Image (cartoon, rainbow, N blue to C red):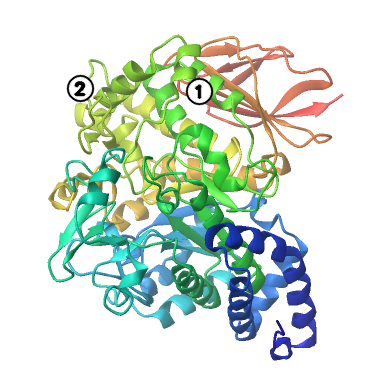
Amino acid sequence: MTLAVEKLGPVDRAAFTARLERILPDARRALGALYGDSELVWTLVGDALEYAAVRAEPLRRLDRAREAEPRWFQDPGMIGYVCYADRFAGSLRGVRAQLDHLAELGVTYLHLMPLLKAREGDNDGGYAVADYDAVDPRLGTMGDLVDLAAELHRRGMVLCVDMVLNHTAREHPWTRAHREFYLTFPDRELPDAYERTLPEIFPDLAPGNFTRDDQLGAWVWTTFHDYQWDLDHANPAVFRALLGVMLRLANRGVDVLRLDAVPFLGKRLGTDCQNQPEAHLVLQAFRALTRLAAPGLLLKAEAMVPPDLLGGYLGDHDPYRPECDVAYDNQLMVALWSAAATGDARLAAHALRRRRPAPERTCWATYLRCHDDIGWAIDDTDAAAAGTSGPAHRRFLSDFYAGRTAGSFARGEVFQRAGDGASPISGTTASLCGIEAALAGGDAAALELALRRLESLYSVVFSFGGIPLVYMGDELALRNDPAGRNGPDNRWIHRPPMDWAAAARRTRESTMEHRVFTAVRDLAAVRARTPSLASSAPATVLDSGDRRLLAYLRGAPGGDPVLAVVNFGPDPVVFEAALPDGLGRPVLLHATPGAEPLGPDGVRVPGCGFYWAVVHRT
């Protein structure tokens, strides 16, 4: 096939041709396995060329810089912040007006939760998209999004936006113009056959996986809600249409696409229709073709799957297959909440020690909270190695964080029932780590421990590896929003509107907001100037010598690593574990106040405290 590459200038033409040579084998392999059409790849390459030809020059400059430094997103100065635009500042223009708040915190990566036009009424928090090419009018216009992206780039920040791949709203124009884009059935024969092995995602809110549509006269696959129609990713026209959406968003200045619900893209009878080979092939093809037209664009996988399956979404196959660039480290998140509840880091240490690292061209997104509930992804093997039962421990965590366990410091709420009793939990970081309970009880000692707990949990998010993400309000210790119980579901209790009065208190030294904001800001600043904390630097979990301690080394071979120690217990603990040969005495980098060296090899870590040190090689 002859490509009209003359649409590009000489420099861009050469770069496009070089990229095509690199990605063509990956694209051909994935598309051939999916669709069995050897000519489809050239149609899609032609589409990519059309988008490359109209890409704005400032974005092309970013592309060239990122191609020259392909690990740009693994820089230790990449610090993330996640929020809903309306909850943070009312609109996209409001977000732009509040960027100084983020810059003060050290943020360089802004993830705005779903902002494309969703259906009216219930819309799953914006994930029922009715128009991929329009912004929710309550937030502004597509022009406002372009302006925000340009301002972020001017400040050295990047923009992440959600792209829903598995489904659209039933009101989307495609449901009328392209019914073949969706999975529909004339009767219940196949739906019933699929249902025998399908789990329910929202058993309380939206039981079942299929919905009868009387106007259509058919049953529609609706994995999440009855108003969200699953797309048929076995149809190449669906792939082409979604590729166009992704490239249009990239050309409007979006730097990262958070690909929603990616485990659900492949449907196979007799399975749970999650994590199927087709889902990975779709992502591999998207990665190749978006990289062809917009090489500065990153893909981030939203895959809340068992730990042993998570690496596949980063291309961790044998052999390696380029897939997404970033994936959420939900295993680390759950391990941290487990250690905080029990005061015991053994399960976390075992789980993190045995897993495979992210492929070197990729990284994790590390976090404590997101917009969703917390599901207890604890592997039974890891639990057994830590001396407990997986099912029993998951039930314990659910009860503990719902405040149903004696001595619990948490004030979370059960999101929905779980048949095994391990129900997922809603709640802000501050409410889950004890700040809400301590304030309500007027307990100064408990408040001090809770504040240290929040700071130390975030110290792991910032130091274990990956791009750290701060969920909106955590930097101010915002608690559960009671008004959220009036929303479609109780996850809105941890999606409070930004409290700008609380934000103003961050400048007053006697306030809790000042303490927490300063703590998070300092973690970001220390990380940004410490090369061994780059996202790609490997982590080595150490034998801490005490069940309350999680200890690990970060750093590339040949450099001076960083030693991180976290005490999950309420009382001080002395860390004296031997370091690997060739490492000298740790030198304090950053720590909870009260952490102090004890002799040449030990350090006293306060209750619920942390300690970072640079370890020089001898």
- Dot 1: what SS? helix
- Dot 2: what SS? loop
The label number, if any, that marks residue 263 in the structure image = none
Q: Is residue 41 above or below residue 281?
A: below
Graded by Cα atoms within 10 Å as few (under 14), some (14 to 19) or many (20 or more), the crowding at tag 2 reads: some
Residue under pointer 2: 404
Residue 170 image point, x, y percent: 24, 68
Amino acid at dot 2: Arg
Residue 490 image point, x, y percent: 20, 45
Q: Is residue 408 above or below residue 535?
A: above
Quarter of the figure with residue 580: top right
Graded by Cα atoms within 10 Å as few (under 14), some (14 to 19) or many (20 or more), the crowding at tag 1 reads: many
Residue 248 image point, x, y percent: 50, 77
Q: Determine whether, in the image, residue 174 is placed left or right of residue 107.
A: left
The N terminus sits in image quarter: bottom right
Amino acid at dot 1: Ala
Could you say which is closer to the camera, residue 125 or residue 470? 125
